[in-house]
C-alpha cells in the first residue's frame, strides 16, 4: 500500500497534536506516514484561506471552541507535554526550509522532533535566527550545515513544490493527510484515517472488530 | 442523567444529517436527545459567525472539502435519501417558529420529520408560504393552526429564547449539542458524543469494550 501522507508546518498547534498521535496509528495499522513539510502561509496564499486566529478574530465563541477542542484532544490522547507557544504565531519559513534541508542531510526525524518539541513542549521563539541556531545545537543537529542548506535555491524550491503538491490534492490548511488520493483535513479526522488504514490493511475479521462505533 | 440537547435549524444540511444519526445513538446508549429549535440566522447575528457558503465563498478548496465530508458522512451512515435542496439557502424563520408552535400543539416530532424530509429528501422551497402550507397539509399536520400560532408573540419569543440559550452555552453554529454543560459543534462530533454518553451510562465492563479506537 502507498504510504499515507502527513502535510505539516511546525507553526500549527494542531499539526503538533496530530503528529503525537500518528505513532499509535502506525503501530495499530502497520502503515507508515510520509511526513511532508509545507509552508502554511504559502497554502493560505494559494487557497485564499486564513489562520483560524485571523478568520475567527470577530467570533469569540468559535475561537473559544477551538481551544475547547484542543483541550479535549489533549485529554483524550494524554498529550500533557503540550504548551501553547507564547510567541504564537511564529513565522516558520526558515523552519520549514530547514525541514527540507534536514531531509537532504538525512536527519529529518531528529530535526522534526526538535522543532515540534521546542515549538509546543518547551516553547521558544523559533523565528529568531539566534534562537533557532541555538536550538539546533541543543538538539545535537548540524546547525551551520542545515542553516546554510536552508538558503539553497533547490531547498526553497522543494518546499514550494511540496506546498503546491498539497494544494493540488485539495489541501487548504494544516494538518492535512492523504490516504491514497483521499484528502483529510484536521486532527479530528485521525480516527477516520485509522479506520480507513485498517480497512485497507486488515483481514476481514479484524476489520469487523475494529469497525466504527457509529456504523454498528 | 440530564437529556443531551440537539440544537437545530432545518436550513442546515448538517443538522439534517446529524438528525438522521441520533436515533442509532439513542438506541445504543439509552439517552434521549431533547430537540431544541433555534434560528441559525439569529445565532450568526449574536456571534458574528457566517454560514460556510458565505465564509468560504473565496476559498474553493474549503467549500469542496465541506462537500467531500458530506459525501463521506452520507456513505458512512447510509443516508441515501439525502438531496441537496436546489433552493438552498432557504429562509427558515417561519419554519423554526412553526417548530416551536408544533411543540405547543404536541406535534413536534411529526412536524420536525416533515420539515427535514421536505427540505433534504424531497426538497421543496419551504420559504414560500404557499409551499409551506401545502407541505403541512401533505404531512397531515394542522396547517392553519400551526401557521396562526407561529405568528404569536409568545412563540416568536420562545424561538429567540432558545437561540439565546444556545448562544449562552457557547454555540455559534448548527448542529450544536450539549452533553451536560459540554458543547459539541458539528456532525463530526457525534462519535465523541456517543462515547461521552456511553461513559456516563454504561457499566465499567461495557465502557472498556466500547472504548474509542484512538485511545487504545
Image (spheres, coloured by chain):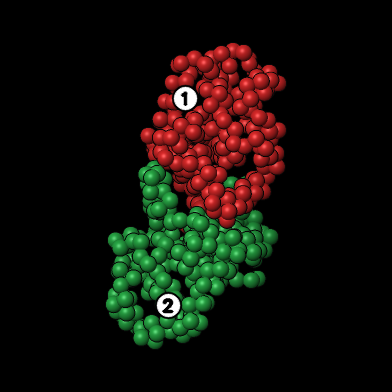
Chain colours: A green, B red
Look at the picture and state if A27 lies above or below A102: above
Horizontal arrangement in the rendering, residue A26 relative to residue A94 (left or right)? right
Task: Report the residue at 57% width, 37% height from top.
Answer: B12
Query: Is circle 2 on the same chain as circle 1?
Result: no
Look at the picture and state if A151 lies above or below B115: below
Q: Is residue B33 visible?
A: no
> In the structure shown, which secondary structural element does the residue marked by tag 2 occupy?
helix
Residue A141 image offset from top left, x and y in percent = 37, 83
Q: Is residue A205 visible?
A: yes
The residue closer to the viewer here, B198 or A189, is A189
| Chain containing the residue with disc 1 | B
| Chain containing the residue with disc 2 | A
The residue closer to the viewer here, A18 or A77, is A18
Task: Report the residue at 68% width, 33% height from top.
Answer: B123
Tell me the residue that label 2 is attached to. Answer: A98
Measure the C-alpha gap from mark 2 to mark 1. Answer: 55 Å
Task: Report the residue at 68% width, 44% height from top.
Answer: B78
Residue B180 image offset from top left, x and y in percent = 41, 37
Look at the picture and state if B76 lies above or below A172: above
Look at the picture and state if A132 lies above or below B180: below
> In the structure shown, which secondary structural element does the residue marked by tag 1 occupy?
helix
Residue B151 image offset from top left, x and y in percent = 52, 16
Q: Tag 2: Cα neighbours inside 10 Å, few (<14), some, or many (≥20)?
A: many
The residue closer to the viewer here, A189 or A153, is A153
Tell me the residue that label 1 is attached to. Answer: B159
Quarter occupied by residue B179? top left
Residue B6 image offset from top left, x and y in percent = 50, 34
Picture quarter with the N terminus of chain A: bottom right
Quarter occupied by residue A29? bottom right
Amino acid at each position: 500500500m502507498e504510504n499515507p501522507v502527513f502535510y505539516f508546518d511546525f507553526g500549527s498547534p494542531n499539526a503538533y497534536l496530530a503528529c503525537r498521535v500518528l505513532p499509535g496509528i502506525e503501530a495499530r495499522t502497520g502503515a507508515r506516514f510520509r511526513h511532508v513539510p509545507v509552508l502554511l502561509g504559502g497554502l493560505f496564499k494559494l487557497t485564499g484561506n486564513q489562520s483560524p486566529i485571523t478568520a475567527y478574530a470577530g467570533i469569540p465563541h468559535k475561537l473559544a471552541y477551538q481551544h475547547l477542542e484542543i483541550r479535549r484532544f489533549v485529554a483524550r490522547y494524554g498529550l500533557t507535554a503540550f504548551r501553547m507557544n507564547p510567541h504564537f504565531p511564529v513565522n516558520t519559513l526558515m523552519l520549514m526550509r530547514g525541514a527540507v534541508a534536514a531531509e537532504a542531510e538525512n536527519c529529518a526525524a531528529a530535526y522534526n522532533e526538535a522543532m515540534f518539541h521546542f515549538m509546543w513542549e518547551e516553547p521558544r521563539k523559533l523565528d529568531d535566527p539566534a534562537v533557532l541556531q541555538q536550538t539546533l545545537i541543543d538538539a545535537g543537529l548540524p546547525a551551520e550545515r542545515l542553516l546554510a542548506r536552508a538558503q539553497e535555491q533547490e531547498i526553497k524550491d522543494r518546499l514550494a513544490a511540496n506546498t503546491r503538491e498539497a494544494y493540488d490534492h485539495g489541501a487548504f490548511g494544516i494538518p492535512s493527510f492523504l490516504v491514497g488520493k483521499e484528502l483529510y483535513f484536521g486532527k479530528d479526522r485521525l480516527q477516520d484515517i485509522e479506520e480507513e488504514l485498517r480497512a485497507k490493511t486488515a483481514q476481514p475479521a479484524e476489520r469487523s472488530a475494529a469497525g466504527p462505533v457509529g456504523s454498528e
